[in-house]
Image (cartoon, helix red, strand yellow):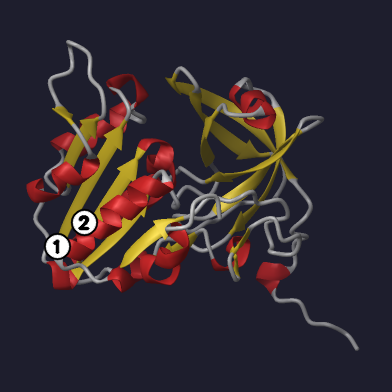
């Protein structure tokens, strides 16, 4: 029997497409943002919150959340922290180097559900990278969102990402933006403490609020608990979960998280669906 393949499924999901590095930005001592352009007719279109599998030839492949503007189809942006052999190789790439990229994969932030509601975005550390496209998209749809707020926490001032974006968001009348750090040096004049300490700074109506949260799992648990205490329902709190994705299509099982395969049902999920599992260390 002949199988009919939908147009969006006609590309081979396991075949990397060649992309060339056209720009790099050193964000911190161990984190780099890279701008890629396609060397084929493959134009990657993605939803904020999705990820790709990024392959360095001769080294290996890792899942990386997409950090760029979802409306710029000819560009692909990844922000990568050097924590292993493959990510160190990615952070060492220079303009002109070629990599293989597959995707996009996974679920995205449900921005289509926030019209007429307050949107609260909470990021911890490099968790701002998967949320950056959601911030960009929310700003393009600003007229349909009642109140838009972004809270961002990092370990130190030196660990803050996207410093130009931070300046722009702080100055913008379209978004309430607050930032804090865990530890500060003498020339830091901002807030010091947990990102949850910033919640009283921003306006939101709990029964009309949707929250996007991304960061270390312990941070997401703390933020979700604080939001629940404030009256935001767990069904309207969304988190992004990291796992050891290998195939990107939920076939190999490396992304299994309890009964879910995060390549298919994640990485973005409502907190109500994963709260019990997030309480289990090393799951």
Q: Position of residue 12 (x, y in %)?
A: 78, 60
Q: Quadrant of the N terminus?
A: bottom right
Q: Which mark is residue 226?
A: 2
Decide: few, some or many residues near mark 1? Use Cα within 10 Å; few <14, some 14-19, many ≥20.
some
The answer to whether the residue labelled 2 contacts the one labelled 1, judged by CB atoms less than 8 Å apart, is yes
Q: Of all residues shown, which one is farthest toward the front?
A: 280
On screen, residue 152 above or below 88: below
Q: Of all residues shown, which one is farthest toward the right?
A: 1
Decide: few, some or many residues near mark 2? Use Cα within 10 Å; few <14, some 14-19, many ≥20.
some
Q: Of all residues shown, which one is farthest toward the bottom?
A: 1
Q: Position of residue 171 (x, y in %)?
A: 14, 35
Q: Quadrant of the C terminus?
A: bottom right
Q: Is residue 48 left or right of residue 119?
A: right
Nearer the observer, 23 or 80: 80
Residue sitting at x 44%, y 58%: 278
Residue sitting at x 14%, y 62%: 230
* Residue where numbered disc 1 is placed: 230
Residue sitting at x 27%, y 52%: 223
On screen, residue 280 above or below 100: below
């Amino acid at each position: 029997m002949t199988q009919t393949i939908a147009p969006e499924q006609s590309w081979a999901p396991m075949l990397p497409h060649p992309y060339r590095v056209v720009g790099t930005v050193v964000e911190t001592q161990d984190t780099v943002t890279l701008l890629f352009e396609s060397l084929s007719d493959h134009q990657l279109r993605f939803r904020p919150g999705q990820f790709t599998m990024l392959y360095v030839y001769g080294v290996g492949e890792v899942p990386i959340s997409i950090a760029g503007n979802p409306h710029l189809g000819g560009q692909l942006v990844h922000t990568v922290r050097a924590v292993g052999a493959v990510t160190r190789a990615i952070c060492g790439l220079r303009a002109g180097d070629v990599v293989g990229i597959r995707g996009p994969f996974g679920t995205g932030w449900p921005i289509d559900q926030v019209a007429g509601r307050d949107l609260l975005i909470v990021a911890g550390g490099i968790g701002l990278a998967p949320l950056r496209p959601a911030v960009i998209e929310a700003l393009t749809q600003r007229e349909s969102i009642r109140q838009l707020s972004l809270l961002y926490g990092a370990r130190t001032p030196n660990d803050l990402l996207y410093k130009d974006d931070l300046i722009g968001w702080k100055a913008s009348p379209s978004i309430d933006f607050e930032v804090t750090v865990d530890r500060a040096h003498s020339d830091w004049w901002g807030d010091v403490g947990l990102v949850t300490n910033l919640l009283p700074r921003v306006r939101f109506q709990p029964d009309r609020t949707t929250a996007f949260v991304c960061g270390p799992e312990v941070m997401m648990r703390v933020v979700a608990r604080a939001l629940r205490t404030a009256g935001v329902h767990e069904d309207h709190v969304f988190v992004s979960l990291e796992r050891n994705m290998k195939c990107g299509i939920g076939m190999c099982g490396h992304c299994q998280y309890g009964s879910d395969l995060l390549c298919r049902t994640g990485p973005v999920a409502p907190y109500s669906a994963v709260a019990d599992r997030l309480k289990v260390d090393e799951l």
